[in-house]
Image (cartoon, grey):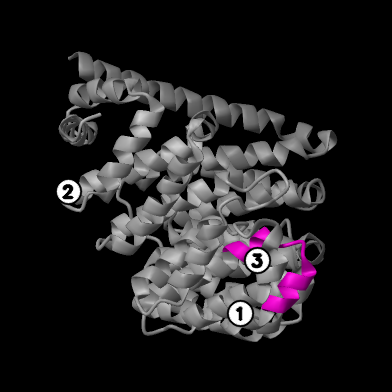
């Protein structure tokens, strides 16, 4: 093919890339049809030229990287084996050179992802790395004075933590030294932060290899220093996500640093100046550790009296909503608010650590919250009682009388959301402690629940009261439930009659 024809093809391809990113749907769809019709080998050639063309736009170079990575991901077995070995070697060399020459960090990162995808596909069935040059390239970049190249090496490694294949044992000390140097490079946060992601990915990929876990444990302090920096800079919450992933997969790897990890998470959780996402991730790290290694967390029980008030404080993070009383309960589903996340965390902690560990500290905070003039504290206290019943079942069952006596007065609370929370607590306790709960307190419970169903001004509270009555009925012994069938049916008939009348009035208003 003549150089003139190649240039013309490339110019047309650059225009096609622009159109593939068009905001106009028709243009984009037509361009996708044209792109999909190009032969895969021709595509590879055009994409590689585009991403290496320093004079083309950043957007086009980025798009070329995305499409080339997709090609290696989806069409590798159809394309790569058909190429001559010298062409394969040329593509490898060009990609590594592109990383060295690219000046734009976002584009360079995308080229690294292309290299990682190619490397992943070149690990053979016998776990042999068929591209040894990429390992040499990674180590050269990792020791480069240029921080962007050090970050590139780590980007490739974090994307493919198995990249060393069956040679991994040979490289263990070199990998460890590389990670340690990068973890300590706090003058260049992006290098340091990427090293955390690398360490996390490598440890999780080798979570069954105790030799590797033991060999790399002494990198955890440097990893935690990097996490402190990331929180201070509020720059990359992926590092907290790495901590959660390690807690989930290899909690014992973190064991030597628990004295530092839990206070660090508590500090983040308690910092109201941080965004909700950061605080929730810190809470999730502790909860995950509690679920995967409860005995280990219980040994650090001195932190529980500090943890519980912080979770309860997040549960108080509620806002007044003028139309709350007429909203559908479904509106709260998949809610990422602090209050919902904290309630779930309290439930999970109670189930993971048990009532002996959790309940004393929950109950130590509940009375003062219930006595608060602020409805949000009363609401949070009642929702906390709902949340901890399953995990603290044995210990709570022994004090049902006191808990019930403390809850029931809030059926008459002046704030509808507190009354809602009371219904929630009673309904949950009917499930968690039935049928004992129903046998002991049926008279008081039914009276309060039937009364709450008269709250026509707050249909959401009304509906939740009815839901709690269903919970009560499900585990209630028949000889007790039969006593209340008449008043329950009468109440349901009254409520339905009123609701039908309201609906009819609204329809008439719309008509006239």
Q: Is residue 55 magenta?
A: no
Q: Which residue lies under the disc numbered 3?
A: 203
Q: Which residue lies under the disc numbered 2?
A: 57
Q: Position of residue 356 (x, y in %)?
A: 78, 73
Q: Is residue 108 left or right of residue 6?
A: right
Given contact means CB atoms under 8 Å apart, are the residues at marks 2 and 3 in contact? no
Q: Position of residue 331 (x, y in %)?
A: 42, 41
Q: For marks 2 and 3, give the CA distance.
A: 38 Å
Q: Say which residue appears at 49% left-offset and 74% top-offset.
A: 269
Q: Position of residue 276 (x, y in %)?
A: 40, 65
Q: For marks 1 and 2, give the CA distance.
A: 41 Å
**Dot 2 surroundings within 10 Å: few (below 14), some, or many (20 or more)?**
some
Q: Say which residue appears at 46% left-offset and 47% top-offset.
A: 89
Q: Say which residue appears at 51% left-offset and 56% top-offset.
A: 159
Q: Say which residue appears at 63% left-offset and 45% top-offset.
A: 447
Q: Position of residue 186 (x, y in %)?
A: 41, 84
Residue 455 visible from this viewpoint: no
Mark 1, secondary structure of its residue: helix
Q: Is residue 293 left or right of residue 35?
A: right
Q: For marks 3 and 1, give the CA distance.
A: 11 Å
Given contact means CB atoms under 8 Å apart, are the residues at marks 3 and 1 in contact? no
195, above or below 205, in the image: below
Q: Which mark is residue 220?
A: 1
Q: Is residue 205 magenta?
A: yes
**Dot 1 surroundings within 10 Å: few (below 14), some, or many (20 or more)?**
many
1 or 2: mark nearer the eye: 2
Residue 241 visible from this viewpoint: yes
Magenta stretch: give its range.
201-216
Mark 2, secondary structure of its residue: loop
Quarter of the figure with the N terminus: top left
3 or 1: tag closer to the N-terminus: 3
């Amino acid at each position: 093919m003549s150089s003139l024809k190649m240039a013309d093809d490339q110019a047309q391809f650059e225009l096609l890339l622009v159109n593939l990113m068009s905001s106009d749907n028709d243009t984009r769809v037509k361009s996708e049809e044209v792109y999909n019709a190009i032969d895969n080998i021709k595509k590879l050639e055009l994409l590689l030229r585009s991403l290496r063309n320093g004079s083309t736009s950043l957007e086009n170079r980025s798009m070329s990287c995305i499409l080339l990575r997709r090609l290696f991901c989806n069409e590798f077995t159809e394309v790569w084996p058909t190429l001559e070995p010298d062409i394969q070697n040329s593509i490898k060399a060009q990609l590594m050179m592109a990383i060295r020459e690219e000046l734009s960090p976002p584009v360079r990162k995308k080229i690294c992802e292309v290299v990682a995808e190619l490397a992943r596909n070149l690990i053979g069935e016998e776990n042999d790395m068929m591209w040894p040059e990429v390992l040499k390239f990674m180590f050269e970049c990792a020791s480069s004075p240029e921080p962007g190249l050090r970050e590139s090496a780590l980007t490739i490694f974090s994307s493919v933590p198995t990249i060393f294949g069956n040679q991994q044992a040979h490289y263990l000390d070199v990998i460890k030294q590389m990670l340690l140097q990068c973890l300590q490079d706090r003058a260049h946060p992006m290098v340091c932060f990427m090293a955390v992601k690398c360490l996390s990915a490598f440890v999780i990929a080798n979570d069954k290899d105790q030799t590797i876990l033991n060999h790399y444990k002494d990198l955890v302090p440097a990893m935690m220093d990097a996490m402190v920096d990331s929180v201070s800079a509020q720059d990359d919450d992926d590092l907290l996500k790495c901590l959660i992933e390690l807690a989930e997969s290899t909690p014992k790897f973190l064991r030597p640093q628990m004295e530092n990890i839990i206070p660090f998470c508590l500090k983040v959780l308690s910092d109201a100046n941080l965004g909700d996402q950061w605080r929730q991730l810190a809470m999730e790290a502790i909860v995950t550790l509690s679920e995967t290694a409860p005995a280990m967390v219980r040994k650090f029980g001195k932190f529980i009296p500090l943890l519980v008030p912080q979770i309860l404080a997040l549960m108080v993070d509620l806002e007044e909503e003028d139309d709350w009383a007429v909203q559908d309960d479904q509106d709260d589903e998949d809610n990422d608010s602090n209050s919902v996340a904290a309630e779930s965390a309290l439930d999970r902690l109670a189930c993971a650590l048990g009532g002996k560990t959790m309940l004393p500290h929950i109950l130590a905070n509940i009375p003062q919250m219930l006595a608060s003039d602020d409805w949000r504290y009363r609401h949070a206290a009642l929702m906390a009682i709902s949340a901890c019943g399953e995990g603290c079942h044995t210990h709570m069952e022994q004090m049902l009388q006191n808990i019930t006596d403390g809850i029931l007065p809030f059926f008459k609370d002046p704030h509808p959301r507190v009354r809602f929370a009371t219904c929630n607590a009673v309904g949950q306790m009917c499930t968690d402690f039935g049928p004992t709960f129903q046998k002991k307190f049926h008279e008081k419970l039914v009276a309060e629940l039937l009364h709450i169903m008269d709250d026509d001004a707050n249909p959401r509270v009304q509906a939740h009261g009815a839901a709690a009555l269903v919970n009560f009925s499900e585990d209630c012994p028949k000889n007790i439930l039969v006593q209340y069938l008449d008043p329950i049916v009468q109440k349901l008939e009254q409520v339905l009659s009123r609701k039908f009348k309201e609906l009819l009035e609204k329809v008439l208003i719309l008509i006239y």
